[in-house]
Image (cartoon, rainbow, N blue to C red):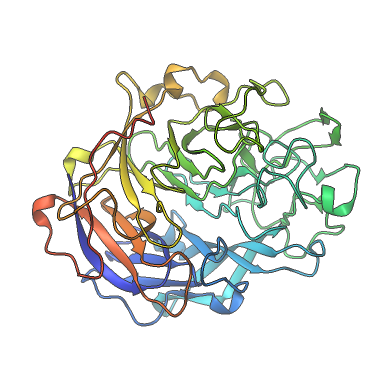
Amino acid sequence: EIGLELVAQNFTSPMMVTSPDDGTGRLFVVDQIGVVKIVDANGTTLPEPFLDLRGNLANLSPTYDERGLLSIAFHPDYRTNGKVYAFYSAPLRSEAPEGWNCTNHISEFQVDPENPNAVNISSEKILMYIDKPYQNHNGGQLAFSPADGYLYVSLGDGGRANDVGNGHTPGIGNAQDLTKIYGKILRIDVDSTATGGVTVQQNMTGTANQTQNMSVNRTETPPEPTWTTFAGSLYGIPTDNPFAETLPEILGTYAYTSVPPEIYAYGFRNPAYMAFDSGGNNTLFVADAGQNLFEEVDIVLGGGNYGWNIREGTHCFDPNATTAPGASCNITGYQGEPLIGPIFEGGHDLGLVVVGGNVYRGTAVPELEGRYIFGYWSDSRTVGNGTLLAATPPTGWAEGALPETAVSLTPDENAMWDVQTVNITGGTNETLGTFLRGFGEDANQDLYVLTNDVGGPDNSTSTGKLWKIVPPTAVTPAPTTVTPTVTGEQTGYAA
């Protein structure tokens, strides 16, 4: 059982909360509408945003949208260099294929040297332009590894359903196509300009909209032609990336000269939540939104293929099978590589979309130590009914035994975790009574929950709230606008 203590409110669509661990005790709340707000150590939300990208965003739908300002990440040396990185959805750039939806930016900013509570917006350096054929499945998470210091980026499969359509590779989809960065986790070195790899040139047949590209630009100017990407000078490729050095290969009928060396892992649908364990061995957890039947959480290892769109969770995926898994499918990827299964798999009777969280390493609730805390967005698109969950590693699971790459992963190391719903003090039923939007940690690794009462980034509302997970005895009565509710039974989805 836990309590939820209200820390701050009046956000619109809060997506994540983070801290640079700079000794100030500040929390930084990322709002999808394009602003990052600071909550100071006294719990006061500063009136002026730390970062304001509202003028840079694509036009968002107030009722539901997967675009916007989706995440930020502070450089590991933020105390000294003042660098912060953002993932946001901008209007479609002129170099993108005609008729596509938007261009996601991965940008570096510098904090104002005269004002530690504000970013110098003119300092922006766009590290990547990622053109999108559809508004959904952006991924959108940035995270620095506490172990290696590299920046990890989660990208969705390009959008629409089934990993098919405009901009998707016919026959296999984007997530399984190693010539494309869609449906992947990327890993880059923002402190280096050494590529560690090769110049990447796609060599595929078909129309421009069918085969257009990795859509990533490593330089300050857009690539020419748009289906080519070049090693550039704004970031480097870690030399131990799985595809840092690749030779010409054949993937089905699609010939290519190289896999983009940024790719760290692949086979994801919409990895919209990603976080490193801040303790232990700094394991990387990704929550990948499912389609028809199953949501999943994965432990991500270098070079791993996580199955989409061959599988949804552990089950065969058939786009025509909306009530039961497909009858048969490949047991390996298209290069004969194993498909790595999730540590959690859940159906849609509990909720519509998985919301990834963090392994609990805080001090407020010691009983949660080592458990992965996550949840479901809601069981309804119109009325918020989010759920909190806690996943416990199986008996005998040893984090220290995990290999650095997926090559030597054993079935025991890839076992399902035991998952339970979480009891919340003061609740009356099995949901939060509001939409669950995200999680995050402070500098002490205590865990926070983000909620709002509407399903989209509606600028006319300010129902977004930031809650801290605390012991149940530490909770004061919650505001009447949001009543946390009780959960507490086995889900039965993970064994």
Total marks placed: 0
| Image quadrant containing the C terminus | top left
| Residue 35 visible from this viewpoint | yes
Residue under the image location 60 percent in, 52 percent down: 137
Residue 11 relative to residue 226: left or right:
left
Q: Is residue 421 left or right of residue 55?
A: left
Q: Which residue: 43% across, 30% down?
A: 343
Q: Nearer the viewer, residue 327 or 421?
A: 327
Q: Quadrant of residue 276?
A: top left
- Across and down, in percent, residue 194 comes to 67, 47
Please provide percent x and percent y for residue 93. Answer: 74, 69
Locate residue 259: give its quadrant: top right
Placement of the N terminus among the 4 image quadrants: top left
Placement of 222 over or under 365, stated as above or below: below
Question: Where on the picture, by quarter, is residue 179?
Answer: top right
- Residue that extends furthest to the left in the rendered view of this protein: 473
Camera sees residue 442: no
Q: Which residue is drawn at the image coordinates 42% and 74% (left, top)? A: 50
* Identity of the residue furthest to the bottom in this view: 47
Indicate left or right for 169 with 43 as reference: right
Q: Nearer the viewer, residue 350 or 423?
A: 350
Q: Residue at x 43, y 62 (%)?
A: 382
Q: Is residue 452 above or below residue 443?
A: below
The residue sitting at the front extreme is: 323
From the top left corner, tell me how far across and down residue 395 is, in percent: 29, 20
Tell me residue 263's x, y (percent): 65, 41
Nearer the observer, 70 or 363: 70
